[in-house]
Amino acid sequence: MEMEQRTDRRQRICILGDSLILGALGESLQRGGRYDLTRLALPDGIRTLDAGAADAILFDLESTRVETVLSLQESDSRLLLVGISPDANLVRMWVGRRLRELSMQGLMNEIQEQLVGDPATGGGWT
């Protein structure tokens, strides 16, 4: 039920920082009109982030205390975190997922699925 409510409304995206790449990404997302964007400056923006305040947080991996941002998934496992490193041409995504009461085989299947990925898209993680 809660997941349905989440997709029926505009998704909330928080942009944490003011790097050039984050600014350009924010402009592109805003033009699409499908998201409510909030821009927060560093370092104060990290302290004002609240669990549930966003569906996704975009941040610069080089200028953010990554551990502080990652800790937000503890209170909202559905939070999408996207860390961008423009200097290294790298994007990292963290998608929280909690799995309970898995058998050893179930855990092994989950690990393999994440490593192999979807054959239709050409594989898993790199």
Image: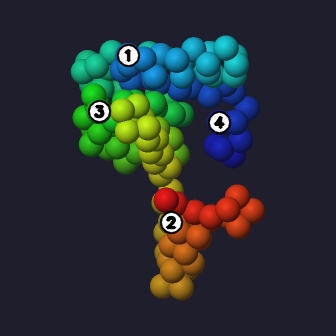
Residue at numbered disc 4: 6
In the visual, does 21 lie left or right of 33?
left
Residue neighbourhood size for the residue with mark 1, other residues' Cα within 10 Å, grouped as few (<14), some (14–19), many (≥20): some
Mark nearer the N terminus (1 vs 3)? 1
Mark nearer the N terminus (2 vs 4)? 4
Report the disc number at residue 62. 3
- The mark lying in front, picked from 1 and 4, is 1
Residue sitting at 38 percent across and 19 percent down?
19
**Residues at discs 2 and 3 in contact (Cβ within 8 Å):** no
Residue sitting at 73 percent across and 32 percent down?
8
User: Mark 2 to mark 4: distance in Å?
Assistant: 20 Å
Residue sitting at 27 percent across and 42 percent down?
67
User: Mark 1 to mark 3: distance in Å?
Assistant: 12 Å
Mark nearer the N terminus (1 vs 4)? 4
Residue at numbered disc 2: 99
Q: Amino acid at mark 3?
A: Glu
What x and y, as percent, mark residue 12?
56, 26
Q: Nearer the viewer, residue 6 or 88?
A: 88
Q: Amino acid at mark 4?
A: Arg
Residue neighbourhood size for the residue with mark 4, other residues' Cα within 10 Å, grouped as few (<14), some (14–19), many (≥20): few
In the visual, does 3 lie left or right of 74?
right
Looking at the rendering, which quadrant does residue 2 occupy? top right
- The mark lying in front, picked from 3 and 4, is 3
Q: Amino acid at mark 1?
A: Asp
Secondary element at image label 4:
helix
**Residues at discs 2 and 4 in contact (Cβ within 8 Å):** no
User: Mark 2 to mark 3: distance in Å?
Assistant: 31 Å
